[in-house]
Image: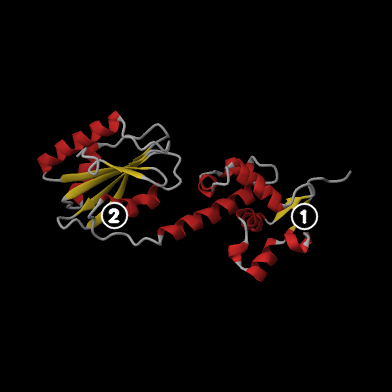
Amino acid sequence: MENYEAKISIKSWAEEDRPREKLLAQGRRVLSDAELIAILIGSGSINESAVDLSKRILIHYAGDLNMLGKGSVNDLSKFKGIGEAKAITIIAALELGRRRKETEHKEAEKIGSSKDIFHLMHRHFADLNHEEFWIILLNRANKVLSKHLISKGGQAGTIADPKIIFQTALENHAASIILAHNHPSGNLKPSQADIDLTRKLRNAGSFLDIAIPDHLIFTDTKYYSFADEGMM
């Protein structure tokens, strides 16, 4: 019986359909996203080339590599022709791309604006499907002492324990604390819980002489600053 799921390697494709050869001859910039993913996949089947399989995956994610980057091994393995090994290869390549992007922005040594906070913390929140709550500890010159993940949760939210936050700040001799968390939903608007927590932490900080100058809410590409919006 003929095996219709047999794999076809890139070497057996027509020359004009070989993304590896195309990269060597014309450079990486000319390859489409599907062709780059096809190189990672390496093989398709008798009924579908690796490029066509890659196109199918990209269509599912509306051509958005950021959305593809959020996919899990289980998500990608649901595509016919993508096993666990291929899914892991795609995820690893996209993670390398994300980390490369991180290094393009040198971390700010001194915080002077909400934009500095965004550049400092954006890499920690990129592509997350769950919520995380971080704090940035500053000295009296507004220079970054350290960053700490306080809690993580599901898509609905996470709990930030004030005791842990101020214990961490005191142990590191911080003069001020910047709060930061993400909204996986993409909605930048602070919830009432966000507002209440910020007010609670500011009031507690005043007793310990630890200022809280800002609280940022992150999505993949944007942020909301409580200080910029007059909420602090």
Specify few, some or many for label 2: CA neighbours under 10 Å numbering under 14, 14-19, or 20 or more: some
The answer to whether residue 26 is above or below residue 117 is below
Q: Amino acid at mark 1?
A: Ile
Tag of residue 116? 2
The answer to whether residue 119 is above or below residue 188 is below
Of label 2 and label 1, which has the lower sequence position? Answer: 1
What percent of the width, then of the height, locates residue 76?
A: 60, 43
What percent of the width, then of the height, locates residue 26?
A: 64, 69
Q: Is residue 139 left or right of residue 45?
A: left
Mark 2 to mark 1 CA distance (whole Å): 49 Å
Q: Residue furthest right?
A: 1
Q: Amino acid at mark 2?
A: Asp
User: In the image, what residue occupies the spot 18% across and 51% down?
Assistant: 174
Q: Residue furthest bottom?
A: 25
User: In the image, what residue occupies the spot 40% across and 62% down?
Assistant: 104
Q: Is residue 156 left or right of residue 25?
A: left
What percent of the width, then of the height, locates residue 176?
A: 18, 49
Instruction: Determine the secondary structure under disc 2.
Output: helix
Quarter holding the N terminus is top right
Q: Residue furthest top?
A: 192
Tag of residue 141? none
Query: Mark 1 sits on what residue?
Result: 8
User: In the image, what residue occupies the spot 44% across and 58% down?
Assistant: 101
Nearest the viewer among 193 and 85 is 193
Q: Comparing marks 2 and 1, which lies closer to the viewer?
A: 2
